[in-house]
Amino acid sequence: MLVDYHLHLAPDGVALGAAELSPARVALYAESARERGIDHVCLTEHCHRFRQAAGLFDHPFWNESAQADLDAYVNAVRSNGPPVGCGIELDWIEGREEEIEALISARDFDLVLGSVHWLGGLAVDHPDYAIWDEMAADEVWRRYFAQVRAAAASGLFDVLAHLDLAKVFGHCASQSVIDSEHEQTADAIAAAGIAVEISTAGLRKAAGELYPAQDLLRALHRRGVPITLGSDGHVPEDLGRDYPRALEAAHACGYRTVSMFSGRERREVPLG
Ligand SMILES: [Zn+2]
Ligand SMILES: [Zn+2]
């Protein structure tokens, strides 16, 4: 079985208007899934695009982005039915656990993806608010993974997205920092009992590799952490993109099953 559990309805910078939040747009993802032999997919739109999430984070980027209606999104996705499920990509924002929980529990999601993009008011992946000019790379990586561990421990998320996103622009930490952070982070995720995605999006960025890196994926497998697969596609054409690379990495690390989600319940099925 194959899944794509990380998909967006429009490219970054394109507002989610009536055309994007329509059954017709969602149907294009269903068609793409069928064409590519992907058995189940979930749309996982960014929470920052919805006005119901406006209060989660007081930041200019967030305030500008929070325009669309979250319930219109859920209704559009739900109108399609299988093989399309409804998820959301939620930022982990420390201190806002209750608001995040309220946003999730009020709606009928199949899957909640947890992401760390922001460290305070600066982002690891947004050029206009880049953290990389402000502090040493080792320090960014330490802070980034500390937030990933906090996200895991929060109990809010089913799957953690792009686990080592901080490499997106090609910034590396020293090997001793990476080794230590990988081990601690794998421990925290295993203790939380949640899954991680293998994301092919990093192949399309300066990082030039899958998220997570192979040694982190091995550390997760050793601890029995389950996986999903995701393209982080923002157009239907990117659904399932570069999956042979993801499958190769999963197999090399020992994975033989993939997690499927429905109504936030996880079950393991054979991978591939
Ligand atoms: Zn993301
Ligand atoms: Zn995403």
Image (cartoon, grey):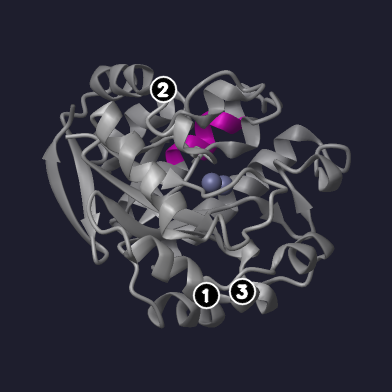
Q: CA distance from mark 3 to mark 2?
A: 34 Å
Task: Report the residue marked by disc 2.
Answer: 214
Q: Is residue 216 left or right of residue 222?
A: right
Task: Report the residue marked by disc 3.
Answer: 53
Q: Is residue 217 left or right of residue 60?
A: left
Some atom of ligand 1 lies within 8 Å of the CB belonging to the residue at label 2: no
N-term-proximal mark, 2 vs 1: 1
N-term-proximal mark, 3 vs 1: 3
Query: Residue at 52% of width from left, 50% of height from top?
Result: 9
What range of the chain is rendered magenta? 177-183
Q: Residues within 10 Å of mark 1 (few under 14, many from 20)?
A: many
Tell me the kind of residue under disc 3: Ala
Q: Is residue 215 visible?
A: yes
Q: How many marks?
A: 3
N-term-proximal mark, 3 vs 2: 3
Q: Residues within 10 Å of mark 3 (few under 14, many from 20)?
A: many
Q: Does 80 appear above or below 209?
A: below
Query: Residue at 21% of width from left, 39% of height from top?
Result: 39
| Tag 2 near tag 1, CB within 8 Å | no
Residue 18 belongs to the span the image colors magenta: no
